[in-house]
C-alpha cells in the first residue's frame, strides 16, 4: 500500500506516521500488492482533531473519518469503519475486477457497525422544484435548518444539491448527464 499523509494546522510526527502506516498496512491483505493508495489527512480545528483516510483501489474509493481529541484514537475508530466498507463492497469490486480482492476474513470486530448499517426508509417527501440562484438556495437551507437543500438552478435549469460540510463550509453537487 502506498501512503500519502498530510496535515492541516498540525505537524505530523514520525511516531504518528509510523503507527498510522503500520495499522493501515493490516488492510493490505484485502488487496493485491501496490494496487492500493491510502491518503491520510490529519486536521486540527480548535480542540477538535479530525482524521480522514481514503483508500483508492483501482479507482474505487473507500473513505472513513473520525473526530476526537486524539489522532491515535481516531485511527482505531477508522479501521473498523474501513474494513466494514471493504466487506460491504467486496462483491462489487470483485465482480468488476474479476480477481480475488477482499478474500480474507475480517480482523476487526464489526458487530456494532453492522447493527448501525441496518436502516430502512421511514419517511418519504415530495416537493416542487422552484428555479432559484445559489444564494437563494443557501438562504432557504438556513431558514429550514437542514444540512442539505435540493434546488433547480435558475440559469442552467439543472437540479443541484447544496450541503453543509463537516468543517462548516458549504458544498455543491452538480450532476452531469
Image (tube, grey):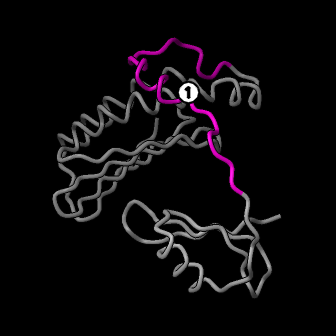
Picture quadrant where residue 135 is located: bottom right
Taking the spot 63% from the left edge, 29% from the top edge, the residue there is 89
Q: Is residue 112 magenta?
A: yes
* Percent of width and height locating residue 40: 38, 48
Give the magenta-colored segment's residue range. 100-125
Q: Position of residue 144 (x, y in %)?
A: 51, 70
Asked whether 132 or 72 is in front, the reply is 132
Residue at position x 58%, y 43% from top?
Answer: 61
Q: Is residue 132 left or right of residue 114?
A: right
When the figure is inspected, residue 97 is found, relative to residue 106, above or below; the finding is: below
Residue at mark 1: 118
Which residue occupies the foreground of this view, 119 or 113? 119
Q: Position of residue 175 (x, y in %)?
A: 73, 65
Q: Outermost residue toward the top?
A: 105
x, y percent for residue 3: 41, 43
Answer whether residue 102 is magenta in the image: yes
Amino acid at each position: 500500500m502506498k501512503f500519502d499523509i498530510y496535515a492541516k494546522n498540525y505537524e505530523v510526527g514520525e511516531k504518528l506516521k509510523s503507527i498510522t502506516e503500520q495499522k493501515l498496512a493490516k488492510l493490505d491483505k484485502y488487496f493485491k500488492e501496490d494496487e492500493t493508495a491510502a491518503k491520510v489527512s490529519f486536521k486540527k480545528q480548535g480542540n477538535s482533531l479530525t482524521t480522514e483516510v481514503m483508500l483508492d483501489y483501482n479507482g474505487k474509493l473507500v473513505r472513513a473519518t473520525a473526530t476526537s481529541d486524539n489522532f491515535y484514537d481516531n485511527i482505531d475508530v477508522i479501521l473498523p469503519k474501513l474494513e466494514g466498507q471493504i466487506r460491504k463492497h467486496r462483491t462489487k469490486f470483485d465482480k468488476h475486477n474479476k480477481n480475488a480482492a477482499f478474500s480474507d476474513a475480517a480482523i476487526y470486530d464489526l458487530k456494532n457497525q453492522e447493527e448501525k448499517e441496518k436502516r430502512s426508509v421511514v419517511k418519504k417527501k415530495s416537493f416542487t422544484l422552484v428555479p432559484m440562484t445559489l444564494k437563494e438556495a443557501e438562504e432557504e437551507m438556513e431558514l429550514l435548518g437542514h444540512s442539505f437543500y435540493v434546488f433547480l438552478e435558475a440559469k442552467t435549469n439543472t437540479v443541484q444539491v447544496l450541503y453543509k460540510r463537516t468543517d462548516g463550509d458549504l458544498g455543491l453537487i452538480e450532476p452531469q448527464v
